[in-house]
Image: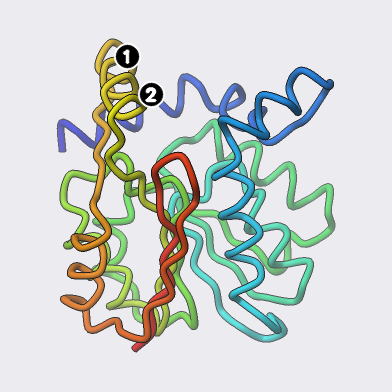
Amino acid sequence: MQQTAKVQTYFTDRARLFDALYEEENAATRAFNKVFRRPMFTRYVLTLGALGDLKGRRILDVGCGSGRYAVELALAGAEVVGIDFSPEMLVMANERARAAGVQDRVTFIEGDFIKWAGQVEKRFDVAFAMGVLDYVDDAPGFIKMMADVADEVIASFPSPTPVRMPLRKLRYKMRGCPVYFYWRSEIERMYRGASLNNLDVRPLGLGGFWVHGRR
């Protein structure tokens, strides 16, 4: 609970700054993103591509943030539920949904997925979490909870690197937010432990993986 509170504070305080990472306002920003934030854009493309025909599908966006994924999926015909514990993120998510005219196909919930998952009755076709497992201290348990409410689970994971990992750990420690890293073998083991097989594992570059598992 203490770790969750730290992560919640971190993202609430930096909600609009984090959302701005997806914007490419000038040539310098585009050049920086192309090298250092490429995994963010790569996992976005991979996720939307893996979901296929979205008409009538129920999608759960865990750690939905400002709703960039959720709104795009709703525009493609999906029924989307997004959950996030940052109220500031959800303000932006609702604004984005209204601007896109998909507020009737997207539901945003303020809360902790770990608590919420145990109360869900309806199953989803797919649950995904992008940039979330970086901050979860029990990744196997988290993936299992996602598998308990969905037939397919998609997630991104940062992996250990000799330079970026220690620098990122130090940076986040100074900001009071924990961050975790995973080897590919660990990721595959936690997916299979949640009865998720038929794994599609894609390297994201600069130390990370995008993983799609199905029952």
Whether residue 17 is situated above or below residue 151 in the rendered picture: above
In the displayed structure, does residue 191 sit left or right of residue 44?
left
| Residue 175: numbered disc | 1
In the displayed structure, does residue 22 sit left or right of residue 211?
right
The kind of residue tagged 1 is Arg
In the displayed structure, does residue 107 sit left or right of residue 166?
right
Q: In this view of the protein, which residue sits in the foreground, 68 or 1?
A: 68
Give coordinates of residue 29: x percent, y percent. 73, 22
Give coordinates of residue 23: x percent, y percent. 74, 32
Q: Earlier in the sequence, mark 1 or mark 2?
A: 2
Which residue lies most toward the front here? Answer: 162
Q: In this view of the protein, which residue sits in the foreground, 213 or 84?
A: 213
CB atoms at circles 1 and 2 under 8 Å apart?
yes
Q: Quadrant of residue 131?
A: top left
- Mark 2, residues whose alpha carbon is within 10 Å: few (<14), some, or many (≥20)? some
Residue that appears at 41% across and 55% down: 209
Q: Which residue is mark 2?
A: 10
Residue that appears at 56% across and 28% down: 18
Instruction: Describe the colour scheme in one phrase.
Output: rainbow
Give coordinates of residue 165: x percent, y percent. 30, 29
Residue that appears at 39% across and 79% down: 150
